[in-house]
Image (cartoon, rainbow, N blue to C red):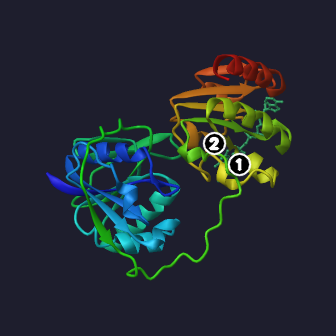
């Protein structure tokens, strides 16, 4: 069995649930993973551990207070010198995978959705096809979230490696993101709006439903490009974020191929569109042919009654 390094996915300084899926992926590759937790204080790693993991290392450095690909790669360089590296396919971690791969001179395989017989499968051409590759030697691999069943937690002791003061990048200032809502890349349920929402203030109707469901609010590129109030961080699609939630609700979104590229692998897709011929319906598990003005209040009332 080869050794591997799983770099924990961090969310606001805490280990994200996606990390358990990364451990499963490393085990599916037939490797024995070491879990590395990038943190500013070792207590973050308390209680972290999974079945199949050989050791847990808290890698401590101030650069981990915020994401900086160059600084993270520098801090993690030594710990990732041996074995394949598994990270999440979030935008940050894809960046990190590429940086670490470049430092080590190894291949990078991004956005993996299947590992079988030592081969990696990932979507290509906006999700229209899958490619399967095998690598010789070590690789840096990013894993799409919500695909692999998470490894079971286990009690483990944690070793601390302190990289403070050894990294040339220092974070001088950290600005909170403008939108304090749950990010689409972290959500199990997403409700997204497109140009069909008419104007940005109508996104408040999506937020209302998102609050009941515990969902994130996303957007199509047309919405992001048309309205300054809808930030690019909400954009789902080829030039936005790739998401893989259990439930994706597309409201007033036509279903262009570039939008589908970012969400077509969602477990359940619900589309609300006034045009019965809209392409999104070809990919939806459930479709409502109606204006959002008609459909959303109904949906909201029923959800409030069930969950509110
Ligand atoms: C290189 C490239 C990259 C791109 N990357 C992305 C990307 O990352 N993400 C992305 O989303 N797009 C991307 N696009 C743009 C993409 O091609 C589409 O233009 C875009 O997705 C359309 O957004 P939309 O569906 O919101 O708008 P539209 O195509 O204008 O569709 C609006 C929909 O709303 C419906 N509608 C209107 N009024 C109502 C109402 N009252 N109630 C219900 N439904 C209503 C209409 O029937 C229509 O289907 C990219 C394009 C290119 C060329």
The answer to which image quadrant residue 231 occupies is bottom right
Determine which residue is flagged by label 2: 259
Q: Where residue 240 is drawn, which disc sits there?
A: none
Above or below 223: residue 93: below
Determine which residue is flagged by label 1: 221
Which quarter of the rendered image does ligand 1 occupy? Answer: top right
- The spot of residue 265 in percent (x, y) is 50, 35
Image marks 2 and 1: residues in contact by CB distance under 8 Å? yes
Along the line of sight, the residue nearer the viewer: 308 or 3:
308
In the structure shown, which secondary structural element does the residue marked by tag 1 occupy? Answer: helix
Mark 2 vs 1, N-terminal side: 1
Q: Is residue 252 visible?
A: no
Q: Residue at x 65, y 53 (%)?
A: 233
Rate crowding at label 1 as few (under 14), some (14 to 19) or many (20 or more) other CA atoms within 10 Å.
many
**Left or right: 19 in relation to 31:** right
Q: Quadrant of the C terminus?
A: top right
Rate crowding at label 2 as few (under 14), some (14 to 19) or many (20 or more) other CA atoms within 10 Å.
many
Above or below 149: residue 305: above
Q: Is mark 2 within 8 Å of ligand 1?
A: yes
Q: How many marks?
A: 2
- The spot of residue 287 in percent (x, y) is 67, 21
Along the line of sight, the residue nearer the viewer: 282 or 101:
101
In the structure shown, which secondary structural element does the residue marked by tag 2 occupy? Answer: helix
Above or below 215: residue 286: above
Q: Is mark 1 within 8 Å of ligand 1?
A: yes
Q: Residue at x 20, y 46 (%)?
A: 30
């Amino acid at each position: 069995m080869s050794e591997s390094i799983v770099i924990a996915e961090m969310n606001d300084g805490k280990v994200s649930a996606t990390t358990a899926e990364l451990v499963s992926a490393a085990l599916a590759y037939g490797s024995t993973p070491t879990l590395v937790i990038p943190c500013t204080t070792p207590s973050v790693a308390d209680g972290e551990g999974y079945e199949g993991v050989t050791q847990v290392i808290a890698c401590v450095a101030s650069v981990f207070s915020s994401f900086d690909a160059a600084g993270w790669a520098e801090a993690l360089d030594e710990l990732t010198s041996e074995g394949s590296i598994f990270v999440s396919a979030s935008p940050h971690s894809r960046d990190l995978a590429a940086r670490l791969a470049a430092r080590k001179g190894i291949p990078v395989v991004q956005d993996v959705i299947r590992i079988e017989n030592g081969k990696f499968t990932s979507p290509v051409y906006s999700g229209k096809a899958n490619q399967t590759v095998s690598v010789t030697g070590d690789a840096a691999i990013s894993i799409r979230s919500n695909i692999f069943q998470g490894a079971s937690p286990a009690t483990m002791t944690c070793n601390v490696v302190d990289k403070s003061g050894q990294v040339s990048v220092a974070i001088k200032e950290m600005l909170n993101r403008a939108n304090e809502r749950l990010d689409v890349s972290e959500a199990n349920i997403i409700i997204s709006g497109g140009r069909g929402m008419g104007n940005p203030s109508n996104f408040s109707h999506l937020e209302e439903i998102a609050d009941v469901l515990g969902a994130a609010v996303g957007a199509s590129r047309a919405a992001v490009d048309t309205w300054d109030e809808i930030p690019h961080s909400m954009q789902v699609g080829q030039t936005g974020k790739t998401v893989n939630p259990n439930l994706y609700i597309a409201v007033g979104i036509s279903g262009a191929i570039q939008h589908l590229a970012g969400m077509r692998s969602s477990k359940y897709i619900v589309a609300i569109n006034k045009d019965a011929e809209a392409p999104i319906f070809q990919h939806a598990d459930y479709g409502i042919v109606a204006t959002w003005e008609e459909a959303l209040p109904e949906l909201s009332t029923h959800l409030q009654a069930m969950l509110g």
